[in-house]
Image: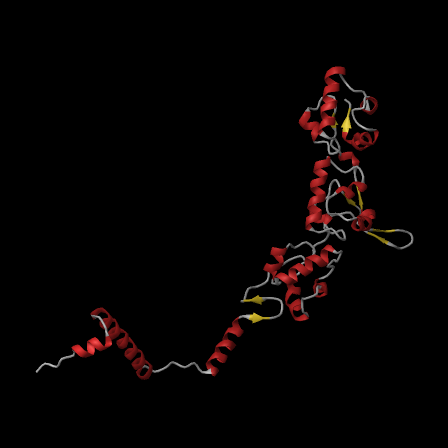
Amino acid sequence: MKPDFEPFRNWFGYSRRERRASFILLLIIVITIALRYFVPEKNTEVEDITASFKEINGNFKLNDNVISGGTVPIAFDPNVADYATLIKAGLSGKAANTLINYRNKGGKFRKAGDIVKVYGISEEKANELIPFVQIKPDSDKRKSTVDTSGRFHRPLIDLNNCDSALLRTLPGIGPVLSVRIIKYRKLLGGYVSVEQLKEVYGLSLETFDIINGMVYADTSVIEKTRINSAGFRELSRLRYLDKYEVTSILKYRELEGRMRNMSDLIENKLISAEKAEKIRPYVSFE
């Protein structure tokens, strides 16, 4: 006689689809439990981890400043090296920034051992870097002099002929300021006075006072604009002229002809006397 399971089915209230799903779930649970008991568990001993770490530590040297995986540091000059070069040389990002800030505040490396002066570079790390430090002589070839009192004088730097690398040897002048000084020189057509450094964006009065006696301006290389023949675009390049003043000069030239000297500009109220003094070195009346 076939047993009647209908009462049980009605009691649980399962449909055919629900019964099938329940059977599959039960089967997964049984298989999971069986695997836990019959498949051996793979344990990693503490000693194995320690041995592995020792092996890794033998290949990679760890210290406070940098992690070097057997990479040989490159030769570098700490007086001029940029951030990317310092990183390649083996410094950490923090140590590289500290070195650049030290340099920007007037710090200078005169010998390889001076690298230890940088905060954040340990003596051990400095000893690793010293063989790769190459201090290059200043690009200014003029010799320093000693006066009769025996005091040492560094050579003056010509603002109109120097490059940004030479400017960075000045205390307080870093990569950003050195580039701005060069760009402003091009905008002016050359420096006629050291005082014009005060007009360079970001150069503080304190920094100017420090470097004032270390630089000069060779005015023989100043680029002059011919005010009687220059067009609007060329006259607009004169740093101290406003556009309305350029327009006034061109209009006067069209109506009255050539200008003989700076007095013509002032007397005809084309520019102020103060403005005339600023542009005087940059214009010619040929």
The number of numbered badges drawn on the structure is: 0
Q: Position of residue 186 (x, y in %)?
A: 70, 37
Q: Note whether residue 74 is visible.
A: no
Establish if 130 lies above or below 260: below
Answer with left or right where residue 125 lies relative to residue 61: right
Find residue 92 and report its image quarter: bottom right
Establish if 73 lies above or below 50: above
- Front residue of this view, candidates 199 and 133: 199
Find residue 236 and report its image quarter: top right
Q: Position of residue 232 (x, y in %)?
A: 68, 25
Q: Position of residue 201 (x, y in %)?
A: 73, 44
In this view, the residue farthest toward the right is 149
Answer with left or right where residue 25 lies relative to residue 172: left
Tell me the quadrant of the picture where the N terminus can be found. Answer: bottom left
Tell me the quadrant of the picture where the C terminus can be found. Answer: top right
Q: Position of residue 229 (x, y in %)?
A: 71, 21
Colouring rule applied to residues: secondary structure
Establish if 41 lies above or below 230: below
Q: Note whether residue 119 is visible.
A: yes
Residue at the spot 83% in from the left edge and 29% down from the top edge? 273
